[in-house]
Structure formats: structure tokens, C-alpha cells
Amino acid sequence: MKHRIGRVEQEIQKEVNDILLKRVRDPRVQGVTVTGVEMTGDLQQATIYYSILSEKASDVEKTQQGLDKAKGLIRGELGSRLTLYKVPELIFKQDQSIRYGEKIDQLIARLHQDEQNR
């Protein structure tokens, strides 16, 4: 069953990226990249993680609003593209891992710089 969930997650990620690129016209979701999808075991709910280039809180909020507004369109498109008994409920969350990785990189660079200054 886990193998099937993984396949469905990959397929949803691919399709949502395509839908955002070609079908959603909302300017708030321009430049959104889907970085991952996490499904519940019963395939009823999909958490879609996304990233954007801007780190400004206002841009993040606008993007989240745009994705929430487009949720119905995206879900409908998924229904026509995927062969699932029921299209899962979609939840959009910003992917924090990229920022976290950048912060770790900065801390490591600072440590190296401190060592060189000793």
C-alpha cells in the first residue's frame, strides 16, 4: 500500500505543477513550485508543499490566498487527470525546508569564518 501512496503522491505533484503553470490564471500563484506531496493512508487528504522565490511575509500570504482560492479548480483538474476513486482534499502549506537549509548553511559559514579569524 505504501508503494501506491508514493506513486499517487508523485503523480499529484507532477499534475499540480502542470495545472498551476497552465490552467491557474491568478497572478498570486505565479512562480509557485510544488516541492512535495504527503498523502494520508486512506488517500483522502493530500498536503501539498510549495515554495516561492520571495521570502516577504506579504508575498507568502498572498500566495497562500491564491492557492486556497484555486483549490477547487485544481481539485477538479486532478479529478479529470487521475484515475482515483475519490480526489483527495487538498491542503497547501509552504515548504520550510529550503529556508531551514539556508539557515544551516549560514551558520556553518559563520563557524568557518570564526575559525579562520582565530
Image: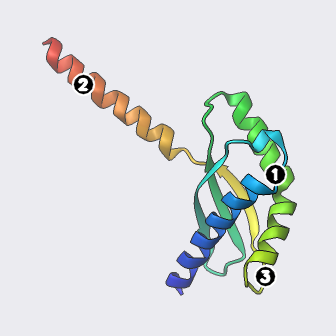
Q: Which mark is residue 111?
A: 2
Q: Where does label 3 land, which residue? A: 86
The quadrant in which residue 39 appears is: bottom right
Instruction: From the viewer's side, name the closer residue of 41 and 95.
Output: 95
Residue at 73% across / 84% down in the picture? 83
- Secondary element under disc 3, as helix, strand or loop, is loop
In the displayed structure, would residue 33 be above or below residue 39?
Answer: above
In the displayed structure, would residue 72 be above or below residue 114?
Answer: below
Going by the image, does 11 lie left or right of 85? left
Q: Which of marks 3 and 1 is nearer the N terminus?
A: 1
Instruction: From the viewer's side, name the closer residue of 92 and 82.
Output: 82
Going by the image, does 75 lie left or right of 40? right
- Secondary element under disc 1, as helix, strand or loop, is helix
Q: What residue type is labelled 2?
A: Leu
Residue at 50% across / 83% down in the picture? 3
- Secondary element under disc 2, as helix, strand or loop, is helix
Where residue 35 sits: x, y (%)? 56, 54
Q: Where does label 1 land, which residue? A: 68
Where residue 103 sits: x, y (%)? 42, 32
Q: Earlier in the sequence, mark 3 or mark 2?
A: 3
Q: What residue type is labelled 3?
A: Lys
Going by the image, does 87 lie left or right of 36? right
Question: Mark 3–mark 1 contact, CB under 8 Å?
Answer: no
Residue found at the far front of this picture? 22
